Every structure is written in C-alpha cells, then in structure tokens.
Image (spheres, helix red, strand yellow):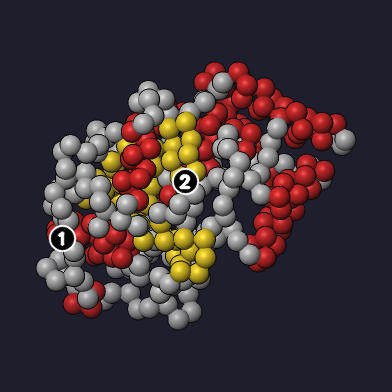
Amino acid sequence: MRGISFWSGDRPEPFANAERAALSASDATPPVSRPNADEPRIVILLGTHQGERFLAEQLDSFAAQTHKNWYLRVSDDGSTDGTMHILRQYQRAWPNRIEIAAGPCKGFARNYLSLLRGASRAAEFYAFSDQDDIWHADKLERAVRWLSQQPAEVPALYCGRTRLVNEQAQPIGFSSLFKRSPGFSNALVQSLGGANTMAFNAATHTLVCQVGTDIDVASHDWWLYILVSGVGGHLLHDTQPAVDYRQHPYSLVGSNLGWQARIKRLYMLNAGYFREWNARHLKLCSTFESLLTEENKKIMEYFCQARQAAFPARLWYASRSGIFRQTMIGNIGLLIAVIFNKI
C-alpha cells in the first residue's frame, strides 16, 4: 500500500495513553452526514499499519465527501502505535459507519486483498484508500458517476492521477499524465494507477474473489488492472487528480517521478524484480485463462514466448504481443528489459 509508515530516526513518540492522543470524538472528530439512501452504496477499503501520524486527516476527508452513502472497512496489519486508538475514536463518533478487522500480516497487498474477501456488506461499488493521503471532496462522487454509467455485469475499474503533497500537505507536483488507452498489453508490464485512486464495481469485486485473494502478487492495484483488462472490462484513468498523495520518508511506495525513482527502477530491473513479478502474474493469469478475451489470450501467449525466446527472436515476440508502457522513457526501459531478457 502506498504510504505505510515505518518509523525511524526522529519519529514522533507513539501515544502513551488516551490523553496524549490529542484526539477525542467530541471535539476533534468531524461530524459525518447520514448516508443518502438515493445514492449508490460504496465501501471504502482502508489498510493501516503504524499510521497514527496522518490517519486522522485522511479519515476527516472521508467525512467531507460530497457522496454520503459510504461505509468504511479497515484492516489493521498489526499496528503497535496509536493507530487503533484513532480508529476506535472515529468508530465511536461515527456509529454504524466503520468496521475494523485484523489483517493477515503478510504484506500490504495481502492486507488489501483480505479486505476485499471480507467485504460482505452489499454494495454497488468499492474504493481502496491509503492511510496517509487526503481525498478531495468530490473523489467518490466522480468515481461513482463514471462507474454508474458502466453495465453492472461488466467489471469496471476507475483510477486516476494524484496531486503530490509533502508531509505538511503542501502541493509539490502531480503524478504522470498518461495519454494512451489502458489495456491488457499495458497491464502486463505496468501498473497504471495507484490503489489510492482506485474504485470499482461489484462485478470487479466478484471477479477478484473468484480468481482468489490469498495469492502472491507484486501489488493489489497492479493485479486488479491485469484482471479487469484481461477479461475485457471497462477502464478509466482520470486525468483530473482527486487525491492528495502524501510523500514522506516513511512511505513504503512513493511517487515514480524524478531521477532517484528512475534509478531505483533501473536497479530493480537489473536485479530481476520485474521478471520475477511478471512470472508471478503470468502463473496466476493461467488459472483464469478461460476468462480472458481471445485477443488477450494471444497477447499473453506472445508475451510468454518473448520471455522464453533467445535474442533476437524475443524482440519479435514482444513486438507481436504489443506490450507498452505509458511514457517514452518507460518504453525505452521496456526495450532494454526485452533485449537483456529482464521481462
């Protein structure tokens, strides 16, 4: 998950008791409007771990949503700081709006997939959330508007750009603007949108649970992109940011912008992480190959052959698969990965 906090160095002191928490349901927790029964119901899926520093600000942004018919399901992955105290305060202040479960403690992706598996409350839509971002007031409204226009029986996935902010929530930039249409040939080699921007319909929820949630994937957002695109579902990458994506030293995953991020990706490519992630995803894809569209079956076949063939044949297979990334620099990196058999 983006933004998991692992404290080090000059970290703030954890809460010693309720008084030091400086958070009370009566004077610090904002009121939340009653659900509007005329609006589609959306379940927010929030994974937490050592999130005391920024969690309240994110919860407050839920209360400010213009779409009021939401329910929050939280999975806490073994926090030992003040995270659970904050969650309980909000749970008392917002009765019947928050459910808290214990996470599997097997990493952020497993935590979010367990949230999906356990989301038993009937809902038309679902949305992932990180613990340290800030949602714009119309975040849910915009996602629900697009999702409501998609056929209910077809898996649909909404994601988008983010506005990057620093620890003090001051804007410092934006995530990349992707112009190419999303699809399976992109999903095989790139995670298009962060989970902190993702919302999806009940058909996507059913699809994920059908394929399985106790699985080993690189990240839950990348996996949903592969799944939904693979079966021919509907996808939208919103060019207008609706999330303030906080950048701080304790983030497990940060922005992909800048030369430091590019150097890190090159290191991971050379170390074989990219190839190993692809191997995991392709193995899982084979378990639901019957659900793939015919075109996507051919794309996956060519991609698998590209991974196995000797040079220069793998260039031909990679070309036939149509795999691509969303930026010019990304495609240069992809070509390098193909040449050196790192895909």
Residue 148, x across and y down, in percent: 33, 33
> Which of the marked residues, 1 or 2, is nearer the chain's N terminus?
1
Look at the numbered disc 2 and give the secondary structure of its residue. Answer: strand
Between label 1 and label 2, give the one nearer the viewer: 2
Name the disc covering residue 238, or none.
2
Residue at image position (37%, 43%) is: 143
Q: Give how far apart the Cα atoms at labels 1 and 2 are.
A: 29 Å
The quadrant holding residue 61 is bottom left
Tell me the kind of residue under disc 1: Pro
Left or right, residue 23 beside residue 58: left
**Residue 65 in the image, given as x and y percentages of width and height:** 26, 53
| Label 1 Cα crowd, 10 Å radius (few <14 / some 14-19 / many 20+) | some
User: Is residue 98 in view from this perspective?
Assistant: yes
Instruction: Note whether 328 is above or below 235 in the view shown.
Output: below
Three-letter residue code for mark 2: Asp
Other residues around mark 2 within 10 Å, as few (<14) / some (14–19) / many (≥20): some
> Residue 36 vs residue 209: left or right?
left
Q: Residue furthest bottom?
A: 10
The one nearer the camera, 240 or 226, is 240
Position in image of residue 151 (x %, y %) = 38, 25
The front one of 66 and 26 is 66
Residue that label 1 marks: 31
Residue 227, compared with residue 342, is above or below; it is above
Q: Residue furthest right?
A: 312
Vertically, is 302 above or below 62?
Answer: above
